[in-house]
Structure formats: C-alpha cells, structure tokens
Image (cartoon, coloured by chain):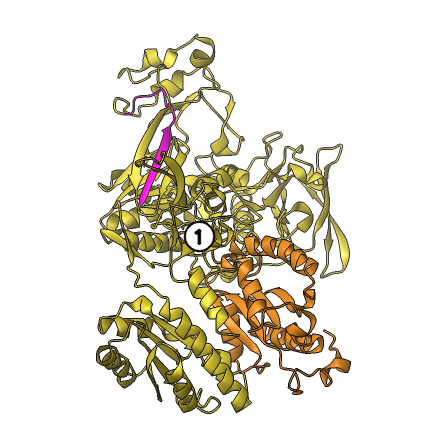
Amino acid sequence: MEQTKANKNTTRDATGETFEPRIVAFVCNWCTYAGADLAGTSRMQYAPNVRIIKLPCTGRIDPLFILKAFEGGADAVLVSGCHPGDCHYTSGNYHARRRWAVFHKLLDFTGIDPGRLHFSWVSAAEGRKFADLINDITERVRGLGPFASDNPARRQA
Amino acid sequence: MARVGVFICHCGENIGRTVDCAAVAAEAGKMSGVAVAVDYKYMCSDPGQAMIRSAIAEHKLTGVVVAACSPRMHEVTFRRAAAQAGLNPYLLEMANLREHCSWVHEDRAAATAKAVDLVRVMVEKVKRNRALLPVRVPIEPTAMVVGGGIAGIQAALDIAAGGRKVILVEKSPSIGGHMARLSETFPTLDCSQCILTPRMVEAATHPNITLMTYSEVAAVEGFVGNFQVTVRRKARYVDVAKCTGCGDCSTKCPQKKIPNEFDANLGTRTAIYTPFPQAVPNKPVIDAEHCIRLTKGKCGLCAKVCTRGAVNFEDKDELVQVKVGAIVLATGFELWDHSAYGEYGGGRLKDVIDGFAFERLASASGPTSGRIQRPSDQAEPKTVVFIQCCGSRDEKMGKAYCSKICCMYTAKHAMLYRHKVHDGRAVVFYMDIRAAGKGYEEFVRRAIEADGAEYVRGRVSRVYRRADGKLIVRGADTLAGKPVTIEADMVVLADAVVPRAGSEKLAQMLGVPYDGDGFYSEAHPKLRPVETAAAGVFLAGACQAPKDIPDSVAQASAAASKVLGLLSRDELEREPIIARVNSQTCVHCRACINACPYRAIEDAALPARAGAPAAQVARVNEGLCQGCGTCAALCRSHSIDLDGFTDEQVFAEIATLE
C-alpha cells in the first residue's frame, strides 16, 4: 500500500489548506457496517474523512448513487460488502460485483480517475481491515487531489 | 410538515469525551425539519427513553433520530420506545456516533464535524421514512420432515410431541436410515437396532405423525408457512392395508440373487422384499426392475401364495399434494465410492471394503450372521488393516474436509473384530485421531490398550493382491520413521462422508444453498446452525455436515424447536423492509424475478381496465421478500423500490454530503 508521499504535503484545496478528502462509503448492514462497528469497539483509529451510508446489501447499490456522490462533493467513493459466498442475502454481492466491473470501466471512460472508486469485501470480523482501508483510501485520494480539480465540468454545489 | 426530534447521547464519556454533543445538538436544531434537538448522558436508560417518549407527545414528532451507539446495539430499544409513545417504530433511525465516530477518532474538531454530518444524513433519511406495518402471513400448522433416518425420526417425534402434525417422507421402503444398518454404536457399543427400533415404532404409531415411505419429494411451491409439496408415492405393488407382513411372498420369490443394498451388496435379496426384519412399516415392496412378473409378464408366485390378496401388479406411482408450514431436511449421507482410489484397488479388490460393509459383516442380522468373513472366499480374515481418511482431508480427491466419524467407527470396528476373532490382528493406519466427543477418547484408548488394536501413524501408499491371495498393504510408520508392509486378509477403508446423491436437486427445489462439497448450508455457521437461507426450511443431521448420532439427534431436536416456534402462531410477522413494484411502470422484463435470491417476486396479471389491455407485471411476495434490494438496483424502469431504503431516501442521504 504505497503512499504518494510526494503529494501528501503539497496537495492543497482552493483555500490553501491541506486537502482533506471527503469519502462516501456505501456499505452493507451485515458485514462491512458490522466490521466498522468492530473497528470502533476495538478502538482502532482511522482517518475521519469517511461518511458511511448504510444499506441492507451491496446489491441495493444503484450506480446512480455513486454518480450522485461524486456529483455532490465526494472525492472518493467506497463500496464494501460481504465476501463472495457470504452474502447475508445469498447473492446480492455478486450483483454488486458485476455492476461494479462494468461501471468501473464506464467511469474510467468518462475521465474520472479510477483511483477514486474503491470496491472491497470487509466481513463483520474484519475491523482492522476496515480501519486500514479507510486510512489507505484517504491517503491515496489526498494524493490525487480534490475531485473538482480534475473534473471541472462537475456541477458546482 | 416534518417535525423531527434529534436526541444526542453522550453515552457517559464514550461519545462525550471526543464529540461535543451540545454543539451537535445545537447544529441539529438548525437543520430543516428538526423540531427539537437535545443531548443527554444516557439515551438508552429509562429516563432517556422517557425523554424521547414525552418529546414525541409534546412536539407531535413525525420522526426521531437517536444519535448514539450503533443501531446494532439499540435500534430495537429505541423503536420500542417510539412505539410506546404512539409513533410508528419505523419512523425512528439511529446515527452511529460511537462505533463509527467517537471511538475511532481522537481529534475533537474532526469528530464533532463528522458527528454533525452523520446526524444530518439520518435526519434527511427519516424525513422520508414511511410508517411501515409488519407483514402478516398465515401459517399452515403442519410440518414435513424429509428423510427417515435417526435425525428425521427425532425431529418428527419432537414436533409431534409439541402438538403439531408431521409428515415424514422417506425414500426407501422403511424408515431407520443408516443407523439400522449398524452393528453397534460408539462409544457405548449399544446394539444399534435395539436403541433405534423403539423410536421407529413410536414414529409409526404416533397420532401426529404420518409416514410416507417409499416416497420422494417431487416438487415444492410456496413459501414459509405456506408450502405446497408434491410427494411421489412410488408403487409398492403391495396393498399395505391388507398385508400382514407374514413374509410368505419373499420366501416363494424365485428371484433370489439380487444384490442387497442394505447389506452393502454382500448379501442378496428377493424381488419382493422387506429391507430388513425390523423394517417400519413391516410391509414388502416389489423391486420393479428385477420382478419377473413386472418385466416379463411371467411368474406372479407371490400373488398366488398371499392369503390376503395383498399383491397388486397394477399399482402405479401416485402424486400427492400436501400443505405444510415448515420443512426439515434430514436426508443424511452416504459413503464416497472409493473406486476413484486406484492405489487401494480402485474398487476391484473384493476384500477391500468400506465401513458399512464391515458393519453388515459384524451385525448379527447381517449376511454372515455376525461372523467376520471376507467377501472373496468367506474365509475368516486373520489380519485386517483399517485405513483412515480415505478420500477425506485430501484435496486431490476433491474433499479437503474431515469426515468426523471415521476415527471413532474405525476404533469400533477394530474392537468388534478383535472381540470376534480372538487371534486376529487389527492394524489401523491413521493421520490423526479425532475423538472429541464425550467418552470418545477413552473409547479409542480402550481399543488400543484393552483390545489390542495396533495403531500406526502414517498413510498407505498401495494395496494390491499378491499371487497367493494376500492383500499387501504398503504404508509408512512415521513415528518410527520407517516404511511398513502388512500382509492382510481384508482391508477396511474409512471412506469420506458425502451427501446423498441427488440431494442437490432437493436443495434447488427449495432454494436452499449448499456448499462446494454438496452439504446443505446453514444460515450462519456459528449462530444459526439449523436454519437455512430459505425461510421455513431447516436442517438436521449429516446432510448439513458429517456428524455422529448424538449430534444428529441434538440438531434434530434443535430444528424441531425452530419448527415449533414457527408453527406456534396462527400468523407470521415479518420485518417490513420489503420491495414494492409500481405496476404502472413495470414492463415485465423479469430481471428482478430472475435475480431475487429468495424467488420472492412472481409474475402477476393486471386485469384489463378501460382502454388498457391486461398486462403482466412483477409482484413481490411480502411473505418471502427479505429486503436486500438487489431488485431495486437492477430495475431498468425504476419500478421497484425498497421500503426502508428507498431511492428517495438514499439520494437525500447522499445530498447531505455536499
């Protein structure tokens, strides 16, 4: 998990402050949300840049949610659910995975840096993995800079 | 006009130390639609809950956000409090300020800013929540148990004892399963049939239990509480009402040489037969494939000698429809076919047998009346080698798992052999000894110390027949560090436990998932061992995983208790997080129907209205829908939405993060 150290201290947003990325995470209630709870119960510290939106299953995630998140101010989006084979609803995460495989390419085609969309499997037992994931994404996206900086066509909030 | 109440909890110091709760409450008070915003030390306490209830009344709140710990902790608590105050419980949401905020961040300013964002997300969601009512589904108070082995029998007896009717469906002509084939059971060396047959009789005579033997499940429709099961009752060619079980028919049947499956093909049976003397029901069936009358139109002796006229060659399979509210799968296991194991003879060496064959040799009612005789020449073997882990723990053979029961039954076999052949030599090749149950370790030690079984730690690389008829077993003794060769008269392989052939078809009929080894999947490996992903379908016994008799019985009783819980009410109340189809915009592309893991969406006909033709649309079965939302995300016409997590709600949550 390399960090773009060169960018870390030099990326600044429009006001000249060190850029704090805004990350929106769409997570499933049964695995990743519970994994995040475990990170909390274990007092694992991670970057405060993420805002979690709870859904029953990653299968519920319409690609429009991700687009709206970028449109509305997110610098990165994370989608995280149960491991393949472990979906609480049997197969919702498979649908999410298929959608992501296509959507990820589409997003790339539109010019959005693929480093801004992350997809992961975090189980209810993987508190550490969740904390590390948020820290990792925060640093990567800090290096990429604000979403608006490389997507000038985005609607202004 | 929305009037949302926001309650920020300090959780003692847990939230309050890192998040400035008063500041969050102040910010919340400014949010559009918020009528009241307060903070308090312990929202989940009695005074905290009372605060919520009185605020609901005083401010006529239309929704509540409790910003505190994880909803996984106290959502139920607060929803109940809201309901007590007359607010629909689904108009209350929680924001997670503890596990997701105060406990994972140290910077007070950052944590407080995040807390405000999290509260805002939930306020926007709850403004769009609708009052939801639990879904009610009627329940048929009858259960079905598929599989009449010890697990199925136990489940049926427990459900019947609980006052509910049970239909016990068994594929073979008699109930009893594999346990009826065993000689003695570990660790007590109880006579297997002696402890089993009273249960079999009880199941047959219990007023709440209906036996359907020689029958199979052909189709299943419906859902939890309302299954319609089609059972194929195979033609017995014997009228069980007239038959007295005298056995004259079998005595006279000229077809005497059919390999007897019950005896692991070591013995033979007739075409009209009862599988074993203690069969329940103790009535014969005719094996249509081998009966001369049914295949060639000749003979018919059994009908002639039957004084009751019970033989009926015109019998046909019958399809019977039954309604049940719950189903228990107890289809059991079989032993893996070791002909894949070329190193051990590939199934061609007659004196290399499996565990069930050994049981039938040892059994007093078996083909050799309990004398240990080897299949090739009926001679008494003086050296028997037992090889554990044949197929199990072997990824090359496709089975990485341990079959759990083989260490124990191999020790038992070694003991039974030594009890019957006093000058015999029993050698056991093992990798590990798994004897974890009650009395199990002592049992294995007894086999070694009291009964003289020789245990060699190492695998066997080859078994072959030498010209003089001896079976040469070449293996390793890893503790001594040298190769070992045994000249054996008979070899018993502890073949892997596998699910019954055809069990996956039954699972597919019911929508029950199964794993890569074919065993049925439980709903949660730790906490829900007898439920499945299919509501109303439960598991008992070895069909779920290799299992011994005590655990099969325990699991069967557990499944029965779940069934009785389900059937104890007239109606089933379900969480109302369910999907809804807008039949006006649905184009019936059926993508949702195909994607639903619970088959909860069905085709529905819209009646013709003035001007509009009758149309087909999708419709969600509220009894089955589990609320995952997969359908909502893939509907091309945006015609399905998920109550509790609607598109409108999610977009509103996202919009707060601008």
Q: How many marks?
A: 1
Q: Which residue is drawn at 28% across and 23% down?
A: B243
Question: Where B440 sits versus B274, above or below?
Answer: below
**Nearer to me, B431 or B337:** B337
Please tell me in which quadrant of the rendered image residue B488 appears: top right
Q: Does the magenta stretch include residue B238?
A: yes
Left of B507 or right of it: where is B624? left
Look at 32% across and 45% down and name the residue there: B156
The kind of residue on which mark 1 rests is Ala
Which residue in the structure is indicated by mark 1? B533
x then y, percent, for residue B35: 31, 80
Q: Chain for mark 1?
A: B
Please identify which colour was used for chain A in the image: orange
Residue B23 position in % (x across, y down) = 43, 90
Q: Which of B32 and B490 is in front in this view?
A: B32
At label 1, counting other C-alpha atoms closer than 10 Å, the crowd grade (few under 14, some 14-19, many 20 or more) is many
Q: Does the magenta stretch include residue B362?
A: no
Relative horizontal placement of residue A42, taking residue B345 as reference (left or right) = left
Chain B colour? yellow
Q: Is mark 1 on a helix, strand or loop?
A: loop
Question: Which span of residues is magenta-colored?
Answer: B226-240
Question: Is B123 left, or right, of B415 in this rendering?
Answer: left
